[in-house]
C-alpha cells in the first residue's frame, strides 16, 4: 500500500502462493470430475427402457453419485490388486496388496512395472516428488496416463500431499525428500489400511511389506560405442517381513526386446548375502 488510493487501485493484486497440497487437491478434483463423467456416460447407455412384456418397462436407476462416492471414499482392507505376473513372481507368487507399503531402490522402471497392473485395470495412480518421472516410459510399460496424477515438487508438504492422494487414489508413489521417521510411517500406514491404497516408496521406508533393490543391469543393443539400447536384464534382490516374501534374487527383463516385463529364469535363487540397507528396522 502506498497511501495513494489511485496508485493502489491501479496496481495489480499479488497472486496468492499455490502450495503443492493445493495442486494435489486441484488435480484430485479434476480426477473426480472425469471419473464421474465416465460413470454417468456409461449409465446413460444402460438407462434405456427394458421391456418386461405387456407394455411394462423399467428404467435403470441413476446411481452415479453413490458409486463415485463409494469408489473414492471406501476400499477393502488388505485387498489384492491386479499385478503383472513378473512382479508377482518377485513377491513369491503373491499379488500386490492394498493397505501395504513396498519400497524400491535402483530402478524407476521397476516402480512403473508395479504401477502397471493396477493402472491397466482402471486404477488411478499418483506420483509425488519425482520431477524426472518419465511419463512416456511409464506408458510403454503399461501405465494409463489418463489416470495419472503428478505432483513433481511437494516441497515440505510431501507427507500431506501423499495423505491427500491416498484418500482418493489406488496407487501412490513417493520419493521422500529425506529419511522417513517411524512416526510418519505409522501415521500414513493407518490411513493406507483404512483406504486400502497401495504405497510404493522410492528408497527406504520403515515397516515396508517388501523391499526390492536392483543390484545390477545388463543392457542389450549397444555395439562398439554406437547403437540403441533395446533391452535390459536386471538382477532384483527381494526381502520381506516374516514369511510373506522369501529373500530371493531374481533375473528380470526390464524390459525385453518386445517391451514386455518378464522373468529371465523360471526360478529365483536364494539370497546369499543381505545388503546393509535391507537390515533397516521394519518398525
Image (cartoon, rainbow, N blue to C red):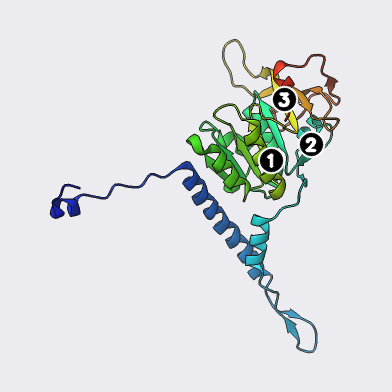
The picture quadrant where one finds residue 106 is top right
Question: Could you tell me residue 108's position as x and y percent?
Answer: 62, 29
For image coordinates 63% across by 70% down, the residue present is: 44
Mark 3: give few (<14), some (14-19) or many (20+) Cα within 10 Å.
few
Relative vertical location of residue 182 with respect to residue 47 in this rendering, above or below: above
Give the mark nearest the N terminus, 1 or 3: 1
Separation of residues labelled 1 and 3 (CA atoms): 15 Å
Relative vertical location of residue 200 with respect to residue 17 in this rendering, above or below: above
Q: Is residue 26 left or right of residue 244?
A: left
Give the mark nearest the N terminus, 3 or 2: 2
Q: Report the mark closest to the observer, 1 or 2.
A: 1
Give the mark nearest the N terminus, 1 or 2: 2
For image coordinates 63% across by 27% down, the residue present is: 203
Mark 1: give few (<14), some (14-19) or many (20+) Cα within 10 Å.
many
Separation of residues labelled 3 and 2 (CA atoms): 29 Å
Is disc 1 in contact with disc 2, using a CB cutoff of under 8 Å? no
Residue sitting at the far bottom: 54
> Which label belongs to residue 30?
none
Separation of residues labelled 1 and 2 (CA atoms): 26 Å
Q: 60 or 240: which is nearer to us?
A: 240
Residue sitting at the far top: 224
Which element carries disc 3, helix, strand or loop? loop
Relative vertical location of residue 223 with respect to residue 160 in this rendering, above or below: above
For image coordinates 76% across by 88% down, the residue present is: 55
Question: Could you tell me residue 257's position as x and y percent?
Answer: 69, 27
Say if residue 278 shows up in the picture: yes
| Residue, disc 1 | 189
| Residue, disc 3 | 281
| Residue, disc 2 | 85
Q: 78 or 251: which is nearer to us?
A: 78
Say if residue 153 shows up in the picture: no
Question: Could you tell me residue 121's position as x and y percent?
Answer: 71, 48
Amino acid at each position: 500500500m502506498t497511501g495513494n488510493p489511485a496508485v493502489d487501485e491501479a496496481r495489480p493484486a499479488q497472486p496468492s502462493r499455490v502450495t503443492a497440497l493445493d495442486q494435489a487437491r486441484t488435480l484430485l478434483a479434476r480426477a473426480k470430475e472425469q471419473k464421474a463423467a465416465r460413470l454417468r456416460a456409461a449409465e446413460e447407455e444402460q438407462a434405456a427402457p427394458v421391456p418386461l412384456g405387456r407394455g411394462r418397462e423399467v428404467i435403470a436407476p441413476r446411481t452415479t453419485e453413490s458409486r463415485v462416492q463409494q469408489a473414492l471414499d471406501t476400499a477393502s482392507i488388505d485387498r489384492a490388486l491386479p499385478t503383472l505376473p513378473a512382479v508377482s513372481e518377485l513377491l513369491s507368487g503373491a499379488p500386490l496388496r492394498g493397505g501395504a507399503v513396498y519400497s524400491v531402490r535402483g530402478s524407476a522402471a521397476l516402480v512403473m512395472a508395479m504401477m502397471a497392473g493396477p493402472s491397466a485395470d482402471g486404477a488411478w495412480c499418483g506420483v509425488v516428488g519425482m520431477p524426472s518421472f518419465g511419463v512416456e516410459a511409464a506408458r510403454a510399460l503399461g501405465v494409463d496416463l489418463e489416470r495419472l496424477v503428478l505432483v513433481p515438487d511437494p516441497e515440505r508438504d510431501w507427507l500431506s500431499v501423499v495423505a491427500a492422494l491416498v484418500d482418493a487414489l489406488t496407487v501412490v508413489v513417493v520419493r521422500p525428500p529425506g529419511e522417513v521417521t517411524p512416526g510418519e510411517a505409522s501415521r500414513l500406514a493407518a490411513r493406507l489400511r483404512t483406504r486400502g491404497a497401495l504405497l510404493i516408496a522410492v528408497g527406504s521406508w520403515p515397516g515396508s511389506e517388501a523391499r526390492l533393490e536392483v543390484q545390477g543391469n545388463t543392457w542389450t543393443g549397444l555395439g562398439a560405442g554406437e547403437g540403441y539400447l533395446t533391452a535390459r536384464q536386471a538382477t532384483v534382490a527381494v526381502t520381506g517381513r516374516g514369511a510373506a516374501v522369501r529373500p530371493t534374487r531374481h533375473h528380470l527383463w526390464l524390459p525385453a526386446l518386445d517391451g514386455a516385463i518378464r522373468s529371465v529364469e523360471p526360478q529365483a535363487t536364494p539370497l546369499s548375502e543381505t545388503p546393509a540397507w535391507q537390515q533397516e528396522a521394519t518398525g
